[in-house]
Structures are given as C-alpha cells and as structure tokens.
Amino acid sequence: METLAMHISNGIIDGPVAAIFAALALAALTVCVLRGRRDLDDRLAPMAGLVAAFIFAVQMLNFPIFTAGVSGHLLGGALAAMLVGPWVGALCVAVVLVVQALIFGDGGVAMLGLNITNMALLGTAAAYVLIAVLLRVLPRTRAGLAVTAFVAATLSVVVASQGFVLQYWLGGTTDLGNNLTGLAGTMAGVHLLIGIGEGLITATTVLTVAKVRPDLVYALRSLRTPAAPAAPAVPVTGGAR
C-alpha cells in the first residue's frame, strides 16, 4: 500500500477527519509555543534553528528497507527532543513538515494536520517520555546516552506509525474490511526497521554534540537524577534539642 508512507498524501484520509486533526494539531502547537518560550535562552534559540535545518537536510536522504520494498528517512522527533526539548522539538519538526508539504509536495497540504500529529507531536512526545525514563535508569555515560537515543528514536517511529493507523480507521478512503489489524502490524513492522536507521542517526548525532558541548543537550540539562536531600544543619548556637 502507498499508505505505508508516513507523509500522508491528499485523499488518503477523508476531509472531516483531516480537519479535526488539523484543529488538534494547531491547538497542540499553540501549547508548544507557549511552553517552549519558557525554555528559550541564548543556547536553545540558535540550537533550535540548527536542529530544524539538520532534520530538514537529513530527511532528504532516504535509506531502503529491502525486506518491505519501501524506503525510510529520519523523522527527527527523538533527536529534537534530546537536543532542544519536547516543546521546541515538536515545533522544529512541524516547521520542517510544513516546508516540505508547501515547497516539495512531500505529504498533502490538506493532510498537514495528520502528518504533524503523527510525526511532530506523537513522535516527539513518545520519544521524550522514553528519554525521561531511560536517563533515570541507565548510567550517565556515553553508552547510556547512546542506548537512550537509539531506543527512544526507534520506538517513537513505531508510535508515530500507529497514529496513522488510528487516523485511517477513523477516516480512510479505502475500505480495508477487517484488515485494520493487518495494516497496524505491517506499519509497525516496516517502521520498526525504519526506526532502527533513525536510532543510529540519532545516537550518532547526540553523542557527537554531547562530546563537544554537553551543555547543548537539553535532556542532559533537564533530566537529571534528583540529588538526595541534605541533612538539616544544626544551628551554630543552642545545639539540637
């Protein structure tokens, strides 16, 4: 099926469902703008531009999935979440998707709400949840950071693909009969392979940045293991009672 592509083309999902997801995506991006403004500082603002440009450039490079007869490319949600956080990261991916749809015709303009929901919102959110969990479990070493980036990127792609399955169930223009489960399995299997490629790119990029400027990795700054509370100090005079 051509619907294996994560960039949904016009006509694959009906108009009412596309309109609903466009409204949901707009509302979610508004929240991202409001929350992202709190994170922006002299480090994060230029980093956000670099992340968006990097994702845009790397998305132009497709790698083949020979077992499925399709190709995949970086979605960027996990990479953006690790480097600039979930709120700004979702905005970076959304900007890339808008530019691709309007200028390069990659994904239908009428389907932008669907594509943004899957790749910019679901993908980034799933990645950040996994990052938050893994960075509190794994050691803060290069190996731990690499595993975190790889797992978060791989699984976030699968989650994003299941967003499409939900949307197709709600408003797909082709009747699949009772084969929706088959579509979900096919999408998950193909995008797991795509996710592995994404995981390798994400882990390599994050490790490179962390090696040179660890202070630019948002996840390392914000997801620190809470320190144990210090014991209350005994007053200088009077002693303890």
Image: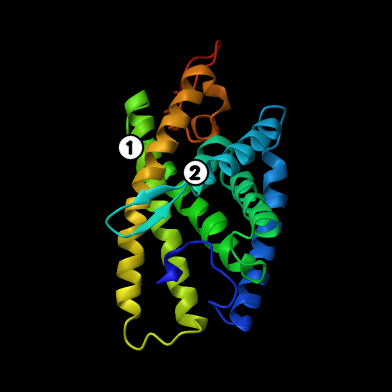
Q: Please, which colouring scheme is shown?
A: rainbow
Residue at the image position 33 percent from the left and 37 percent from the top: 137
Residue at the image position 56 percent from the left and 23 percent from the top: 215
Q: Contact, CB < 8 Å: mark 2 with mark 1?
A: no
* Crowd rating for badge 1 (residues with CA inside 10 Å; few <14, some 14–19, many 20+): few
**Residue 41 appears in which quarter of the rendering?**
top right
Going by the numbered disc 1, the residue's amino acid type is Val
**Residue 123 image position (x, y, % from top left):** 49, 54
Closer to the eye: label 2 or 1:
2
226 above or below 70? Answer: above
Q: Seen from this angle, which residue lies furthest top? A: 236
Q: Seen from this angle, which residue lies furthest left? A: 67
Q: Is residue 62 visible?
A: yes
- Secondary-structure class at tag 2: loop
- Comparing 67 with 176, the one in front is 67
Name the residue that disc number 2 marks: 61
**Residue 10 image position (x, y, % from top left):** 60, 73
| Side of 67 relative to 73 (left or right) | left
Residue at the image position 43 percent from the left and 26 percent from the top: 207
Residue 37 got which mark?
none
- Comparing 136 with 120, the one in front is 120
Going by the numbered disc 2, the residue's amino acid type is Leu
Name the residue that disc number 1 marks: 137
Residue at the image position 47 percent from the left and 31 percent from the top: 205
237 above or below 5? Answer: above
**Residue 239 image position (x, y, % from top left):** 49, 15
Q: Distance between the residues labelled 2 and 1?
A: 33 Å
**Residue 180 appears in which quarter of the rendering?**
bottom left
